[in-house]
Image (cartoon, rainbow, N blue to C red):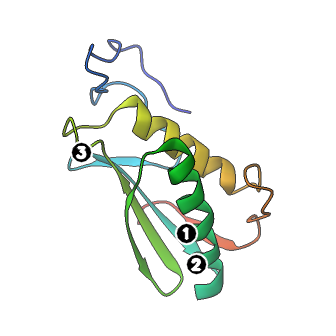
Amino acid sequence: MVTDSAPAPRHDGTVTAETVTPDGWQRDSGALVRRFEFVDFASAFAFMTVVAALAEELDHHPDWCNSYNVVTIELRSHDVGAITERDVRLAARINGLLGGVDAGLALDGLVEGDGMP
């Protein structure tokens, strides 16, 4: 996880642009954004299914898009209109899925490459 020595989140839970950005994620238009590329559609859909279950568990749901083998996820807390600790936590948990750490599903090997172009 990438961190800077910046101010702590404000009392409303928002995270300023100077604080935490999980590995592989970028900040764009007030959201944490990451693009995942898989070997095929079935692998991308399997990943989305696991992320959906995780989002339900955390009660925090992503904006996302799927085009064949590519899944793009945007995380922002709509209730405060900014990136919050909830977004950072969900991004970190999604990162954990890539190694098959969560949900008992081995997703490693399904990803061809990831990160923003």
Mark 3 and mark 1 lie on one chain; the one further toward the N terminus is: 1
Visible in this render: residue 113? yes
- As drawn, is 63 to the left or to the right of 71? left
107 is higher (above) or lower (below) than 69 = above
Disc 2 marks a residue whose amino acid type is Phe
Q: Residue beneath label 3, please?
A: 78
- Secondary structure beneath dot 3 equals loop
On the rendered image, what quadrant is the N terminus found in? top right
Tell me the residue at 66%/70% (across/down).
Answer: 111
Contact between labelled residues 1 and 2, with CB atoms less than 8 Å apart: yes
Q: Earlier in the sequence, mark 2 or mark 3?
A: 2
Residue bearing the label numbered 2? 45
What is the quadrant of the C terminus in the image? bottom left
Do we see residue 21 in this rendering? no
Instruction: Tell me: 42 left or right of 72.
Output: right
Q: Quadrant of residue 64?
A: bottom left
Above or below residue 8? Residue 75 is below
Picture coordinates of residue 98 (x, y %)? 68, 57
- Which residue, given by chain and number where applicable, does mark 1 sit on? 48
Q: Amino acid at mark 1?
A: Met
Q: Is residue 50 left or right of residue 76?
A: right
Along the viewing direction, whichever of 98 and 48 lies nearer the viewer = 48
Position of residue 37 measured from the top left corner of the image (x, y, whole percent) = 55, 73
Identity, as a three-letter code, of the amino acid under mark 3: His
